Amino acid sequence: MPIARLADLADPAECPRLVVKVGSSLLVGPEGVRREWLAGLVGEIAVARARGQDVIVVSSGSIALGAARLGLDKGGRGSLADAQAAAAVGQIALSALWAELLAAHRLTAAQLLLTLDDLEDRRRYLNATATLTRLLDAGAVPVVNENDSVATQEIRFGDNDRLAARVAQAAQASAVLLLSDVDGLYDRNPADPAARRLTEVHGITADIHAMADGGSGSGLGSGGMTSKLQAAEIAERAGIVLGIANGTAERPLARATCEEIGTLFLPRAARRGKAAARKAWLGGRLRLKGALTVDSGAAQALAGGSSLLAKGITAVDGAFVRGDAVTIRDASGAVVAHGLVEYDAAECTRLMGRHTREHAELLGYAPRPAIVHRDQLVLL
Ligand code: GLU
């Protein structure tokens, strides 16, 4: 049975591997670290582990914690330099805390600090997969955060919601639970008395996006509902269930799974197998090297499962090389697919709009008939 309700996230048979993301506002309160609360959560993780469930933690809080220790204003988010310094100070305290509290349950904490590129580059992504798998097999509890002290704006996730979804993908988890200070996704601003929480979402449509107001309650984290929906999209494409629940109260996992207060995003279909995993990685890519714009005929052909041929390309943007991931847009600019391109940008520019049989004459060589082969392409 696939996961259908928040309660299923506590069931190791339905959800053998769970990623739990803990938001900054839960870990750090006005008085500093919320140690008692965290000890409660760690107790719940120990119970889950004892039931036979693998748990990976994605823990925010390094910037908030470091800012408090260094006395930086704006929660350490006033500038990139502040955030980096705060993270360096906060992360060491954060990992010590996780290690200590997990050790009280005889669990070994394992710290992984990742940057965006660690998960965007296929080889590095597979390395992260191997490390996470080995750690879980060895019985450790991975505690993951972004490596905020070295990540600069262009190479940052910037929020741990999307990081958690990518980690869930890399670890082949069944589900990811985002614990923050909101109860879930509401159909309008939650401050509005008429607002209603959605319990389940099947497919993230434009209407669903319109419901997210983009503001996080505490101002401590950088997520907000927008990044949670982006995370849900990454998970959805990977066939992974994503839950959003309020973790503020004691025993947050029990509250989310027993009382079922939250929103569950259900993927349309579980994706299994090597080719599907690769396509999920490609679909979840956040930084692409360039873009190909296609005409309506090519967009239709792609939707029907065909490769992208040069004939249907109307514009080439970016400085990509063969093997890079690119966005494929339709004439209106909407992103229709991600794909690994078979030719460099300059070659694509020469080939666009031209029939495959002309390629050899145009380039002097033509080893590959498609610009993006259908096996290297994922529709979005
Ligand atoms: N990586 C950041 C931290 O540890 C948190 C990012 C977020 O707020 O989602 O402080």
Image (cartoon, rainbow, N blue to C red):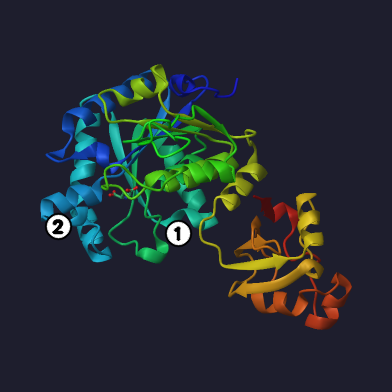
Q: In the image, is 20 to the left or to the right of 229?
A: left
Mark closest to the chain's N terminus, 2 or 1: 2
Q: Residues within 10 Å of mark 1 (few under 14, many from 20)?
A: some
> Which percent across, then down, holds residue 372?
72, 62
> Is ligand 1 less than 8 Å from the beta carbon at label 1?
no
Q: Name the residue under label 2.
A: 72
Residue 316 in sight here: yes
In terms of depth relative to the viewer, which is nearer, 304 or 45? 304
| Residue 180 coordinates in the image, percent (x, y) | 33, 36
Dot 2: what SS?
Answer: loop
* Residue at mark 2 to residue at mark 1: CA–CA distance: 28 Å
Identify the residue at horizontal 81%, vertical 66% (top origin).
Answer: 369
Quarter of the image for residue 190 reads top left
Q: Could you tell whether 83 is left or right of 260 in the image? A: left
Q: Within 10 Å of the Cα at label 2, are there few (<14), some (14-19), or many (20+) other Cα atoms?
A: some
At x 71%, y 64%, the residue is 331
Q: Residue 117 carries which label?
A: 1
Compared with 286, 174 (above or below) is: above
Residue drawn at (49%, 32%) of the image: 175
Please name the amino acid that badge 1 sits on. Answer: Asp
Residue type at the position of mark 2: Leu
The image shows residue 379, relative to residue 256, as above or below, that is below
Q: Is the C-beta of the residue carrying label 2 under 8 Å from the nearest atom of ligand 1?
A: no
